[in-house]
Amino acid sequence: MIQAQKPRLTLALFCRVVDNYGDIGICWRLARQLEREHGIAVTLWVDDLHSFRRICPDIDPAGARQEVDGVLVRHWAGQDGVFAPADIADIVIEFFACDIPPGYITAMARCDPRPVWFNLEGLSAEEWVEGCHTLPSSHPRLPLTKHFFFPGFTAKTGGLMREATLDDERRRFQADPATMADFLGQFGVTPQEMASTKVSLFCYPHAPVAQLFAAWQGGAQAITCLVPDGVAKEAVETFLQAPADPGAVHTRGALTVRVLPFVAQPDYDRLLWACDLNFVRGEDSFVRAQWAGRPFIWHIYPQDENLHHKKLRAFLQRYATGSDSLSALSLCWNGATPHDPDPAPLWPPFQSDLPEMHARADEWQRQMLANGDLTSNMLIFASSLRSSHPG
């Protein structure tokens, strides 16, 4: 007797782009992992396809509906859509409390069984996250329950997003200097630059980049700073004394600054792996820096009343254990110090501590691996909800 094939689980992921690349970066990685590793039919709703295209060149910014890497991408053009129960996915995820269309929610309530509904929250190291992870929230009018799902750094959270093969790929890449040289060579990085301290720089415009460049330029150790197109444009152009176009490069003193094209996510991962130190921003590159096994400085997304400083300190309390220089430079880089935010005096002690930070990066990665990966953890929880409320 031939058994009927079980229909694929479906999932709808709604993403509003606020932080240019962080929001869509996280959602795109999540969508691909759900499809590739778990065989789920994913529909990704995105309101800004132009930003999406910067990290995924296959995206058509004018396409209302398109399939990319096995994921159905829909342009989320507004809140007025009309939906029927047949349009609703088995699992619905709103990223970072974005308001999904009211018509979609109404149709969710008419489904039998009703979908599992998650609010996938932003990443934070604050202690309260553990108490809020997986908490339910009843809809005020409809028979629907939404659950909060928090990524995090402990076993009492959802963990960090990580593909199953990521660690093996990263270790093979970093164990092969020729492969790393070939990868950076495609961007014009010379053998001399390969032999220097390589730093990737991805930050928000208000970072004190010019002051850091001054410290590097006057230092004793050669540094090559690799900057994606459009990042820290004013400071980069001032240093280059030329437009900061991809391929532009200039050396002054001990510092070489080279502008790279904005690359797709897999190549950005390799850039993090190939560098000795990574400056990252927001959430997506922040998480990828932790899986790179390299020291990093996080530029956190700014919030009103400096709430981001509290989140930064909470993370540093967990990560920067015993490293005063890492904490000092991180706080300064984020404007979280009471004095003038000049990172130049903080660079020499930080640079001296880099070997210990490499060891800490490896130790931290082992800790994070023990928590499992966010996607699998979320699906396990979704399965438990579906089992307890089958109808």
Image: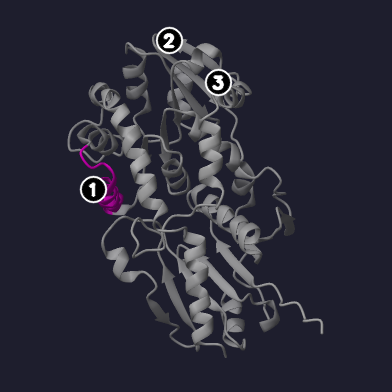
Location of residue 123 (image quadrant): bottom left
Residue type, mark 2 in image: Arg
Residue drawn at point x = 39 percent, y = 8 percent: 253
Q: Which part of the image, by quadrant, shows the C terminus? A: bottom right
Provide residue 137's location: percent of width, then percent of height: 40, 79
In the rendered image, the vertical position of residue 78 relative to residue 166, given as above or below: below
Q: Which residues are magenta?
A: 305-322
Q: Secondary structure at mark 2?
A: strand
Q: Is residue 20 visible?
A: no
| Of marks 2 and 3, the one in the foreground | 2
Residue, disc 2: 252
On the image, numbered disc 1 is attached to which residue?
317
> Picture coordinates of residue 238 (x, y %)?
44, 19
The circle on residue 243 is 3
Q: Residue at x 46, y 77 (%)?
A: 146
C-beta proximity under 8 Å, tags 2 and 1:
no
Which quadrant of the structure image shows residue 279? top left
- Most foreground residue, 374 or 28: 374
Asked if 3 appears above or below 220 in the picture, the reply is below
- Give SS at disc 1: helix
Horizontal relation, residue 105 to residue 374: left or right: right
* Front residue (pair 46, 173): 173
Indicate whether residue 307 is drawn in magenta. Answer: yes
Q: Amino acid at mark 1?
A: Gln
* Residue type at tag 3: Pro
The residue located at (44%, 58%) in the rendering is 372
